């Protein structure tokens, strides 16, 4: 049942870099700061932390345990632990989610490459936010350019995945994650030290400290059930949970790794980088008195104009888009790996072949996503264009349902001792703490996720 000569991570740092690389992505850099800002600042943060620690972490531990215990892809892992039962369908759903998420993820990641290119040629110089916004819309509604960048990004992703675990994913994330960390810390410091912006006549235009207030000040009046649901959904997406990514990475982790420690470190780094992204973005936004608008608009249209006005703007703009692309790349390789591991191991084809086929199929699906901003914009599925459908179905359906089944599987289909031994083989755990984690996996996580899911499809509330 196990696979001979299977590739694996070679070091603890490699494991952390790869798993944190998967977790830290587009979700952290633009989605998290925006959600925090719009959903009550510190109040949202408290909820988010709560979900990361109380639900995200136990589910992540489950995924690591399922993966390392079986050392196979996310579909066969369930078959191995529970033969002749339909649990493996959880893994199948995960592979489907990988296809769908990477199809639109690759499109947005492609945009970051165009913006690196624009930053290099200094194309943002002197442009107002309105002009930049026009430029952004012009770019994404062009039928050709974004597709070319998406293809280039998918080729980069495929090249790393073809390299395998230790020579591809581990090698590249070990370099790129520290780079990303360094860039984001520098940007945070730069943004924080902007101070007070005054016009020539001495009028105050904006203060960077207001950005911090926007980000952290708890406004509990904004908290309603939708915000609670957003916080849980964001925790899942951001931690790469619910679709077998962490199962797949877990399957390449050696027995000498302390899985609970690894899970805690990955969740910590993911949360830290999300907060640092907020600290890098909002003080600058407030300093220049720009409306903290939504998602892609903020990042692609507003930020370049802000950076232009800073000393060393050329470098900051370039650094930001490199950071953005790096974060996307280390996540997209984890998405591709889920599908490649499955096809390579189940169809017994070479890894290179599996990668080329899977990446090509995802790219084709991604082209349709990209074109849904231009020539295919009238093609809709239940009122959404192709891009939004991929995002909606995967994030709101496949990930939460997958996460719920993973928790139920670990809590009810696996033996308690199996879970306990795999989780604690490199370090004891207090009995009470373990009992708490196990209780969450058996009861709290499945019920909480079910409630979120039922709300999000409109069957509750
Ligand atoms: N965690 C990534 C982000 O925050 O951008 C997205 C992601 C990667 C989701 C891998 C799911 C996944 F399996």
Image (cartoon, rainbow, N blue to C red):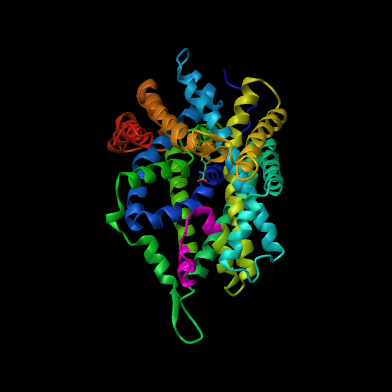
Residue occupying image coordinates x 53% and y 27%: 74
Residue occupying image coordinates x 64% and y 42%: 371
Outermost residue, front direction? Answer: 378
Residue 52 seen: no
Q: Is residue 431 left or right of residue 388?
A: left
Q: Position of residue 276 (x, y in %)?
A: 47, 59
Q: Pick the quarter of the image with the N terminus.
A: top right
Which span of residues is magenta-colored?
Answer: 282-299
Based on the picture, tell me whether residue 291 belongs to the magenta stretch.
yes
Q: Quadrant of residue 272?
A: bottom left
Q: Pick the quarter of the image with the C terminus.
A: top left
Based on the picture, tell me whether residue 255 belongs to the magenta stretch.
no
Q: Position of residue 231 (x, y in %)?
A: 38, 46
Of 83 and 91, the residue lying toward us: 91
Residue occupying image coordinates x 44% and y 41%: 263
Q: Position of residue 420 (x, y in %)?
A: 38, 29
- Seen in the picture, residue 290 relative to 373 is either above or below; the reply is below
Residue 296 seen: yes
């Amino acid at each position: 049942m196990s696979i001979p000569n299977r590739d694996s991570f070679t070091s603890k740092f490699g494991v952390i870099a790869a798993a944190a690389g998967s977790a830290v992505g587009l979700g952290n850099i633009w989605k998290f700061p925006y959600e925090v800002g719009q959903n009550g600042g510190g109040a949202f943060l408290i909820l988010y932390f709560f979900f990361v620690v109380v639900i995200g972490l136990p589910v992540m531990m489950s995924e690591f345990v399922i993966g390392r215990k079986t050392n196979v892809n996310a579909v066969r892992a369930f078959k191995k632990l529970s033969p002749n039962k339909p649990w493996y369908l959880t893994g199948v759903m995960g592979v489907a989610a990988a296809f769908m998420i990477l199809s639109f993820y690759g499109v947005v990641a492609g945009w970051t490459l165009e913006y690196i290119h624009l930053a290099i040629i200094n194309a943002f110089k002197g442009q107002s936010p309105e002009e930049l916004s026009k430029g952004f819309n012009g770019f994404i509604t062009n039928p050709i350019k974004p597709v070319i960048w998406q293809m280039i990004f998918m080729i980069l992703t495929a090249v790393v995945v073809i390299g395998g675990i230790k020579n591809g994913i581990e090698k590249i994330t070990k370099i790129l994650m520290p780079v990303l960390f360094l860039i984001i810390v520098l940007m945070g410091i730069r943004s924080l030290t902007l101070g007070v912006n005054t016009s020539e006549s001495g009028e105050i235009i904006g203060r960077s400290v207001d950005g911090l207030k926007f980000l952290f000040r708890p406004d509990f009046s904004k908290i309603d059930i939708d915000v609670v649901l957003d916080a849980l959904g964001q925790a899942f997406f951001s931690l790469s949970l619910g679709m077998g990514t962490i199962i797949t990475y877990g399957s390449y982790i050696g027995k000498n790794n302390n899985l609970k420690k690894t899970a805690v470190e990955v969740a910590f780094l993911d949360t830290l980088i999300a907060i640092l992204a907020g600290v890098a973005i909002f003080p600058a936004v407030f300093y220049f008195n720009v409306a903290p608008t939504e998602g892609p608009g903020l990042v692609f249209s507003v930020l370049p104009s802000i950076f232009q006005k800073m000393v060393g703007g050329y470098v900051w703009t370039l650094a930001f888009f490199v950071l953005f692309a790096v974060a996307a790349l280390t996540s997209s390789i984890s998405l591709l790996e889920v599908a490649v591991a499955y096809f390579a191991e189940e169809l017994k084809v070479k890894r290179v072949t599996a990668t080329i086929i899977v990446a090509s199929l995802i790219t084709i699906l991604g082209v349709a996503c990209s074109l849904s901003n231009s020539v295919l914009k009238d093609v809709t599925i239940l009122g959404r264009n192709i891009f939004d459908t991929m995002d909606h179905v995967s994030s709101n359906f496949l990930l939460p349902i997958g996460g719920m089944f993973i928790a139920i599987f670990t809590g009810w289909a696996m033996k308690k001792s199996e879970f306990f031994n795999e989780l604690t083989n490199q370090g004891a755990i207090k009995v009470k703490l373990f009992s708490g984690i196990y209780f969450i996996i058996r009861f709290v996580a499945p019920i909480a996720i079910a409630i979120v899911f039922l709300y999000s499809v409109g069957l509750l509330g």
